[in-house]
Image: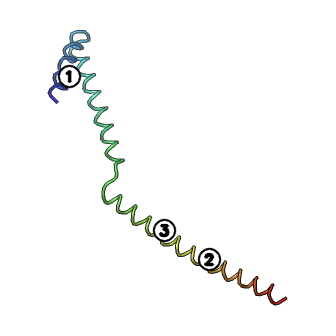
Amino acid sequence: MYLEAKETARLYKLLSDKLGNDTTEAMFKYIDNKTERAVEATIKTLATKDDLAQVKLDLSNKIGDSVKWMFIFWIGQVGATMAILLLFLKK
């Protein structure tokens, strides 16, 4: 952190010598605002523990529903196969 502040101060001095204090101040404010908005946007997209728990709950519900419907499908398939076998065995 110390080096970062020292480098920022050095950069500010170099730019203010070339561009003037007003322009350098405006440029630093612009960079600070832009960085702050980027950080805020990133924070809004991060998932919280509650978000992750909700996703896990939703996935477990969907998996349970899928398994239920797979069993219903399998039972129907077994029933249809048995019916076809019985038809062939009767002939």
First along the sequence among labels 2 and 1 = 1
Disc 2 + disc 3, Cβ < 8 Å: no
Percent x, y for residue 14?
22, 12
Q: Are marks 1 and 3 in contact (CB under 8 Å)?
A: no
The residue that mark 3 highlights is 63
Q: Nearer the viewer, residue 84 or 25?
A: 84
Q: CA distance from mark 2 to mark 1?
A: 68 Å
Label 3 Cα neighbours within 10 Å, binned few <14 / some 14-19 / many ≥20: few
Foreground pick, 21 / 32: 32
Say what amino acid the circle numbered 1 marks: Thr
Residue drawn at x 28%, y 22% as measured from the top left: 27
Q: Is residue 78 left or right of residue 45?
A: right
As measured in the structure, the alpha-carbon distance from the residue carrying label 1 to the one carrying label 3 is 53 Å
Q: Earlier in the sequence, mark 1 or mark 3?
A: 1
Precedes in sequence: disc 2 or disc 3: 3
> Mark 3 falls on what kind of element?
helix
Q: Is residue 72 left or right of residue 3?
A: right
Q: Is residue 88 left or right of residue 35?
A: right
Circle number at residue 74? 2
Residue drawn where x is 21% and y is 18% of the image: 12
Q: Secondary structure at mark 1?
A: helix
Above/below status of 67 relative to 27: below
Task: Report the amino acid beneath label 3.
Answer: Ile
Q: Position of residue 51 (x, y in %)?
A: 35, 58
Q: Is residue 48 above or below residue 54?
A: above
Residue under label 1:
8
Q: Residue furthest right?
A: 91
Name the residue: 76% across, 87% down: 86
For the residues labelled 2 and 3, the Cα–Cα distance comes to 16 Å
